[in-house]
């Protein structure tokens, strides 16, 4: 430790004695701008506003990493180490901060925040990360330059920041690169400039957003026919009319919206044997991302070139005399606490926004929710939550993030039992600590079908994030490869192993 301390002081003194003219006023101002994370919050706002979906994801992960790094550094480690700040007698007055910090010198909180934000951004977008990284490095270096930290403080802060950013992947896993997606090619008509494509635009985000989507679609596929949903117009009726029009043209059905809209369009496209063109216009766009579609241009190029893949369509079918019609899902089916959460969130989001409403609804269902009693394949169960994915999700646990296969013929079933003592508390703690797959209240299996019976009155289900009532008895199964989806061709795509078909 003595040798390291001497090296620390030697480097600090050399930096203090240096007089690079270009940095004399720039670095102190940059260091001050990063106080309380202001610089990075401003950068996050800019990324979210101008960076499209990749920018929004990068900004969100960057801010999450910054918050974790800042909390760990400033509320735990600094109080545990209590290292004195360097003597600044040798630092020129022009460099010194107007207000000297009084907290522990080790580690550098500014460096931890800078490294955390830059690494978080880079995890989502290498292009955006390359822009942010030099600024983060300058902020970290500025802390030695202005005389408030030793070099080892900065190095330790950077390591903590990088670790915090990597830790966010534990709760919010990164999506796999496009090369890891395994898809089978399917035949679909090439529609140059969108001729023969009928696209329904779900105006869920307001008129301005719908107009923007329509403008982007016209620029991408100028010959496509666009149908905009407005006001209280029934989305299902618009999709039925659009599907009939597309069938008459010998073309394809398109949908611009979120996962719920894509689900509704998929069932109609499959029923008529039409290819589906998905334009990611929702908040999360899980299905589009799992296919490898990130932008309107991705879908536009695939439509013009006739590039498509086969996708399984999962089905929810009333059985055992239960009344109701068949429903489908492309992503997930769930019952228990999650449908209750969706219902509460939808009642609040118009007043307080989607994400605050999600947080409030989560707290409410964890406090007031009731377990569901039912039979699974003839066996009685009492559950807090049942999740069934259309295909195998990663990672294990109740934070399923992505799929690499969309036509594996399997349901990914995960359950949280309610007949164990303190089940809700245990599942939350297990999820936070990353031990959920080993928890005794959690179980998972891979099935080709799942029979749910004796569902009580008032039981709700959610399909691709849309909540509704559950029939008394349903069968979940798969319609393998029944949907054809436009998607840019990639070298790793495999030939279709067998013929497809409509419903």
Image (spheres, grey):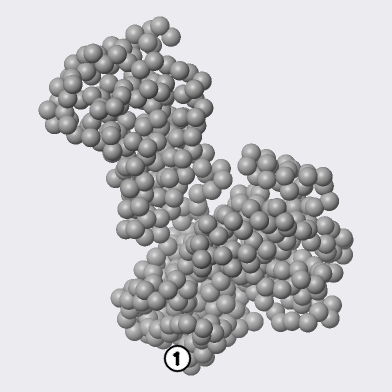
Asked if residue 117 is positioned above or below residue 231 in the image, the reply reads above
State the residue at coordinates (54%, 68%).
259
Is 341 situated left or right of 120 in this image? Answer: right
Left or right: where does residue 410 sit relative to residue 130? Answer: right
The single residue placed furthest to the bottom in the displayed view is: 248
Image point (53%, 73%), residue name: 262
**Residue 217 visible in the picture:** no
**Image side of residue 324 versus residue 93, left or right:** right
Q: Residue furthest top?
A: 2
Farthest residue, direction right: 379
- Of the 4 image quadrants, the one containing the C terminus is bottom right
Q: Is residue 449 above or below residue 171?
A: below
Q: Nearer the viewer, residue 18 or 286?
A: 18
The N terminus lies in quadrant: top left
- Nearer-the-camera pick, 115 or 345: 345
User: Element under label 1?
Assistant: helix
Q: Nearer the viewer, residue 430 or 100?
A: 100
Q: Is residue 204 visible?
A: yes
Q: Residue at 51%, 85% (x, y): give it.
A: 233
Mark 1 is surrounded, within 10 Å at the Cα level, by few (under 14), some (14 to 19) or many (20 or more) other residues, namely few
What x and y, as percent, mark residue 274?
Answer: 53, 82
Q: Give the camera-side residue of 201 and 414.
A: 201
Where residue 265 appears, as percent x and y from the top left, is 54, 78
Picture coordinates of residue 316, whole percent (x, y): 71, 73
Residue 401: image quadrant is bottom right
- Residue at image position (23%, 35%) is 29
Q: How many numbered marks appear?
A: 1
| For residue 50, above or below residue 221 | above
Give the residue number, with chain letter if any, for mark 1: 249
Find residue 216 and report its horizontal and vertical position in percent. 34, 73
Report which quarter residue 141 is drawn in: top left
């Amino acid at each position: 430790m003595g040798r390291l301390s001497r090296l620390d002081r030697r480097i600090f003194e050399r930096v203090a004695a240096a007089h690079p003219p270009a940095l004399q006023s720039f670095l102190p101002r940059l260091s001050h701008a990063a106080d309380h994370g202001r610089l990075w919050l401003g950068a996050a706002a800019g990324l979210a506003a101008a960076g499209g979906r990749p920018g929004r994801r990068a900004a969100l992960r960057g801010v999450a990493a910054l918050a974790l790094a800042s909390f760990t550094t400033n509320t735990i480690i600094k109080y545990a180490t209590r290292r004195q700040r360097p003597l600044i007698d040798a630092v020129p007055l022009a460099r010194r901060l107007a207000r000297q910090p009084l907290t522990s010198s080790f580690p550098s909180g500014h460096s931890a925040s800078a490294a955390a934000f830059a690494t978080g951004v880079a995890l989502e977008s290498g292009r955006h990360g390359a822009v942010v990284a030099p600024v983060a490095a300058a902020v970290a270096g500025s802390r030695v330059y202005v005389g408030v930290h030793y070099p080892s403080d900065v190095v330790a802060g950077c390591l903590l920041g990088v670790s915090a950013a990597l830790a966010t992947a534990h709760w919010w896993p990164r999506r796999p690169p496009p090369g890891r997606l395994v898809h089978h090619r399917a035949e679909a008509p090439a529609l140059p400039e969108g001729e023969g494509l009928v696209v329904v635009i779900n105006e869920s985000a307001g008129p301005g957003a719908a107009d923007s989507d329509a403008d982007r679609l016209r620029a991408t596929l100028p010959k496509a026919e666009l149908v905009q949903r407005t006001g209280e117009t029934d989305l299902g009726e618009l999709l039925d009319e659009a599907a009939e029009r597309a069938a008459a043209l010998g073309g394809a059905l398109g949908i611009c919206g979120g996962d719920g809209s894509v689900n509704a369009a998929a069932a109609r496209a499959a029923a008529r044997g039409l290819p589906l063109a998905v334009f990611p216009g929702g908040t999360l766009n899980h299905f589009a991302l799992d296919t490898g579609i990130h932008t309107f241009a991705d879908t536009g190029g695939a439509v013009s070139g006739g590039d498509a893949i086969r996708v399984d369509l999962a089905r929810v079918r009333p059985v055992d005399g239960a009344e109701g019609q068949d429903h489908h899902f492309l992503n997930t089916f769930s019952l228990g606490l999650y449908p209750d959460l969706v219902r509460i969130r939808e009642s609040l989001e118009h007043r307080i926004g989607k994400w605050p409403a999600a947080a409030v609804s989560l707290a409410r269902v964890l406090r007031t929710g009731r377990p569901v009693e039912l039979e699974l394949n003839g066996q009685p169960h009492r559950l807090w939550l049942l999740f069934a994915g259309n295909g195998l999700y990663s990672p294990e646990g109740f934070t399923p993030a992505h799929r690499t296969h969309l036509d594996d013929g399997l349901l990914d079933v995960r359950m949280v039992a309610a007949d164990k003592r303190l089940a809700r508390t245990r599942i939350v703690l297990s999820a936070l600590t990353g031990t959920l797959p080993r928890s005794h209240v959690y179980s998972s299996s891979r099935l080709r079908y799942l029979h749910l019976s004796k569902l009580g009155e008032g039981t709700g289900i959610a399909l691709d994030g849309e909540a509704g009532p559950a029939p008394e008895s349903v069968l979940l199964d798969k319609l393998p490869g029944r949907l054809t989806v436009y998607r840019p061709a990639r070298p790793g795509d495999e030939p279709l192993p067998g013929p497809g078909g409509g419903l």
